[in-house]
Amino acid sequence: MTYRELYEYGVEALKRADIAEAELDARLLLEYVCRTDRNALLVHGERVRSPIEEEFYKIAIDKRRQHIPLQHITGEQEFMGLVFWVNEHTLIPRQDTEILVEEAMRYLGDGMRILDVCTGSGCILLSLLKYSNECEGIGIDISGEALLVARENARRLCLDAVFLCGDLLEPLAGFVSDKTSDRLFDIVISNPPYIPSGVIPTLMPEVKDHEPPAALDGMEDGLYFYRKIAQKAPLYMRSSGLLFFEIGYDQAEAVSGILRENGFGKIEVVKDYAGLDRVIKAELG
Ligand code: GLN
């Protein structure tokens, strides 16, 4: 089959399976299989592809028909202009989360110490390290499988970061003995799971059936992880250290309250490109 015939096969198959962006996904999968870019369809559409490419493409389309996320088929997602490896053990980096990273970058200075809680693929911490100088970063996740992905991402991006396995800030216990320690963090950042448990069954199949439930589920009211992190983070932050959270569109007020109760002030809410509350910044002390 020619390149264009394969593309048309893919679009048709994905449309029949009710995949929302059939054209886009068919093209991206074809580019992934044939190692081409978007020009190929215009310029080389009549070129006959090899039987192995045809077979591989049909397998990829078949996976996508089953609502397996595109990024789990290609194994990658771009974030902050960098390519991250992802799999079923990590949340797929979202464009909205770039707002969180960009906001933290406005305050990030050379040589600072950064803590990323619930690091997943490591996309937040590694982007911050990539775009700064001499910073030190620690990422924590409860999933050892996610940390394998984060460590591989650090290797591919030639970055040094320490990834620790454990529940929220637990692996840091004993790490800082007093508040004068030079190991305190300047910046704590997190995009924790924040979807209320009851909402998860209503999400699209790509998310609810294929992304790790533990990366989505913020327990009954969606705020569980904000409470836990806001309670523990001050132990490991220098005074006037900054904390950045990604939040759900309707969580700004509740999360601001949680932060105030735990000794944070100068709370600011930042909106995403859709005009929805997306990021909270707070200062300790
Ligand atoms: N920090 C990771 C990300 O933003 C994982 C977040 C999560 O698992 N909730 O992609």
Image (cartoon, rainbow, N blue to C red):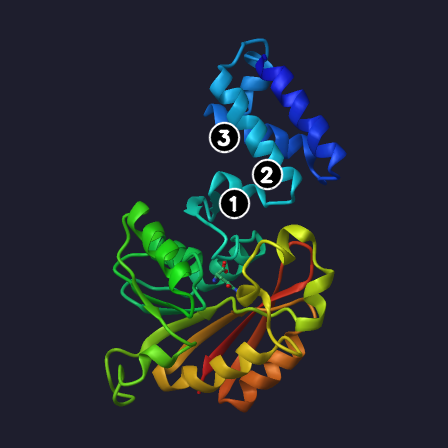
Res 72 label: 1
The quadrant of the picture occupied by the C terminus is bottom left
Q: Neighbour class for label 2 at 10 Å: few (<14), some, many (≥20)?
A: some
Gap in angstroms between the C-alphas marked 3 and 1? 12 Å
- Residue at coordinates 39% horizontally, 58% vertically from top-left? 128
- Residue at coordinates 51% horizontally, 27% vertically from top-left? 56
Regarding residue 106, the answer to whether it shows in the image is: no
Res 32 label: 3
**Residue at mark 2:** 63
Q: x and y percent of residue 2 in the render?
A: 58, 12
Relative horizontal placement of residue 237, taking residue 5 as reference (left or right): left
Give the secondary structure at mark 2.
Answer: helix
Q: Nearer the viewer, residue 5 or 186?
A: 5
Q: x and y percent of residue 19 in the render?
A: 71, 39
**Mark 1 vs ligand 1: CB under 8 Å?**
no
Residue 86 drawn above or below residue 112: above
Kindly check if marks 1 and 2 are in contact, taking CB atoms under 8 A apart as contact.
yes
Give the secondary structure at mark 3.
Answer: helix
Q: x and y percent of residue 220 in the render?
A: 66, 79
Query: Which amino acid, by three-letter code, is at mark 2?
Result: Lys
In primary-sequence order, the first of circles 3 and 1 is 3
Res 104 label: none
- Residue at coordinates 64% horizontally, 50% vertically from top-left? 206
Q: In this rendering, which labeled residue sits more in front, label 1 or label 2?
A: 2
Regarding residue 112, the answer to whether it shows in the image is: yes
In primary-sequence order, the first of circles 1 and 2 is 2
Q: x and y percent of residue 88 in the render?
A: 50, 53
Asked where in the image residue 119 lies, by quadrant, the reply is bottom left
Gap in angstroms between the C-alphas marked 3 and 2? 14 Å
Query: Which amino acid, by three-letter code, is at mark 1?
Result: His
Query: Which amino acid, by three-letter code, is at mark 3?
Result: Tyr
Residue 279 drawn above or below residue 70: below
